[in-house]
Image: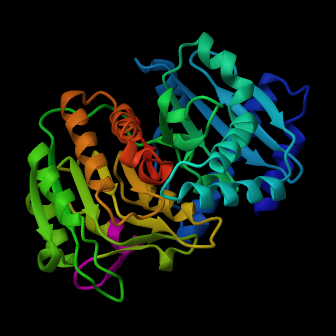
């Protein structure tokens, strides 16, 4: 089915496309996103939700949405600005060149130091994706960029794009949207309470995560938390704790993998891996008197499957299936204290300013970027926010 969607977008997105054709093309892009997720789970998985346009047009913080789709010989971008007709532009880059550039940039970003090759590659992708919209973003005083990404771009953290002087995260808050809809978007309200689950010891042939203990301890200091750690972090205990103690935030610090195959998308508990379908069932376990969705799911030590250009589809799948309004996850895992530092900064900012999860994440990433020890994108770039950015 995928070629059919792309062929239709190819017909609709031409230099002279009118507003109706742009709307139709965007609807087809949405259809492709939903079809890919449905295929990932082998069933329909998106419930009725809020249209992104409504959030962008009504939000207090000005936001813009970038929709991308690769069409073989070019990359098409449709841009939604508040209270404006859609904008459309084309980057003359083939799918092969785009994938090669993304793969090379990902390899560079994972180095423990900031290198010029990474900035050059990040600037090239910035030129294709963001540069044509610079003046429009400035004119509307845009603060948050939301991306509906396609293909290899899904595996790439947009925060690390580079304009020649600044990383994108230095100028904007950033979020990803698996499709054109959000689950009842609204900011966090009331006291922040979290269930924190962590696994630091070696299990199931996975190495120990020595800094998870530090991460869990810091979160307990920053916000009200109950904890499942190592032996107590089992599937049954996670389900039981969620049923007995409703919380707004579920933070899981353990090995995990996102893959384009649902069977290979999982997080690791003490007793066994929890695959994506079971995780969604556990997270849906709420007490009878509390049917509100989880506000925020954080998966802080996961990674995308090596060599899988569609691996981030698994991340989108987890985000959609979990039923959380927002999901924060890492695209690659780091066994050092940078994750603990970033998460601590994130929760401190969120507690003080709960109006924007995306801005809280940006604050945390900028804190690491300003620290010479963590200034390389390897340490701050892999964390992405999916879903509600408010």
Against 284, is 374 above or below? above
Q: Is residue 296 left or right of residue 18?
A: left
Q: How has the structure been colored for display?
A: rainbow
Does 276 lie within the magenta span? Answer: yes
Q: Which of 176 and 138 is in front in this view?
A: 138
Choose top left, top right, bottom left or bottom right for residue 285. Answer: bottom left
Residue most extreme to the bottom: 205
Q: Nearer the viewer, residue 106 or 17?
A: 106
Quadrant, the C terminus: top left
Q: Which of 12 and 312 is in front in this view?
A: 312
Residue most extreme to the top: 139
Against 303, is 382 above or below? above
Residue at the (77%, 28%) spot, across then down: 88
Residue 287 shows up from this direction: no
Residue at the (63%, 65%) spot, across then down: 310
* Percent position of residue 125, x then y: 71, 42
Quadrant, the N terminus: bottom right
Against 192, is 320 above or below? below
Q: Give the range drawn in magenta.
A: 269-280
Residue at the (24%, 65%) spot, across then down: 211
Against 249, is 366 above or below? above
* Percent position of residue 113, x then y: 50, 53
Does 177 lie within the magenta span? Answer: no
Residue at the (42%, 52%) spot, across then down: 379
Residue 382 shows up from this direction: yes
* Percent position of residue 253, x then y: 27, 64
Q: In this view, does 260 lie to the left or right of 86?
A: left
* Percent position of residue 337, x then y: 28, 58
């Amino acid at each position: 089915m995928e070629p059919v969607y792309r062929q239709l977008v190819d017909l609709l997105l031409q230099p002279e496309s009118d507003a109706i054709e742009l709307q139709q093309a965007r609807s087809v892009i949405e259809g492709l996103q939903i079809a890919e997720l449905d295929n990932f789970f082998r069933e329909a998985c998106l419930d009725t939700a809020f249209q992104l346009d409504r959030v962008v047009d009504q939000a207090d913080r000005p936001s813009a949405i970038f929709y991308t789709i690769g069409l073989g010989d070019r990359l098409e971008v449709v841009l939604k600005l508040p209270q404006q007709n859609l904008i459309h532009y084309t980057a003359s880059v083939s799918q092969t060149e785009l994938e090669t550039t993304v793969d090379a940039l990902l390899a560079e970003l994972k180095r423990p130091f900031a290198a010029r090759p990474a900035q050059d590659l990040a600037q090239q992708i910035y030129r294709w994706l963001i540069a044509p919209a610079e003046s429009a973003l400035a004119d509307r005083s845009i603060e948050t960029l939301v991306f509906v990404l396609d293909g290899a771009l899904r595996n790439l953290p947009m925060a690390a794009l580079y304009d020649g002087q600044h990383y994108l995260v230095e100028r904007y808050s950033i979020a990803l949207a698996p499709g054109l809809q959000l689950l009842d978007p609204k900011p966090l309200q009331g006291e922040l309470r979290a269930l924190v689950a962590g696994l630091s010891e070696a299990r199931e042939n996975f190495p120990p995560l020595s800094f998870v203990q530090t991460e869990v301890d810091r979160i307990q200091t920053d916000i009200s938390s109950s904890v499942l750690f190592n032996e107590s972090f089992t599937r049954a205990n996670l389900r039981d704790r969620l049923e007995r103690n409703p919380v707004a935030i579920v933070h899981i610090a353990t090995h995990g993998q996102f893959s384009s195959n649902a069977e290979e998308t999982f997080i690791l508990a003490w007793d066994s891996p929890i695959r994506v379908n079971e995780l969604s069932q556990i997270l849906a376990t709420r007490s009878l008197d509390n049917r509100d969705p989880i506000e925020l799911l954080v998966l802080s030590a996961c990674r995308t499957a090596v060599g899988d250009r569609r691996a981030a589809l698994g991340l989108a799948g987890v985000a959609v299936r979990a039923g959380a309004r927002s999901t924060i996850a890492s695209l690659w895992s780091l066994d050092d204290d940078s994750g603990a530092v970033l998460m601590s900064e994130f929760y401190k900012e969120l507690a003080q300013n709960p109006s924007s999860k995306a801005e809280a994440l940006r604050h945390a990433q900028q804190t690491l970027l300003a620290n010479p020890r963590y200034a390389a994108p390897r340490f701050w770039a892999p964390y992405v926010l999916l879903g509600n950015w408010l």
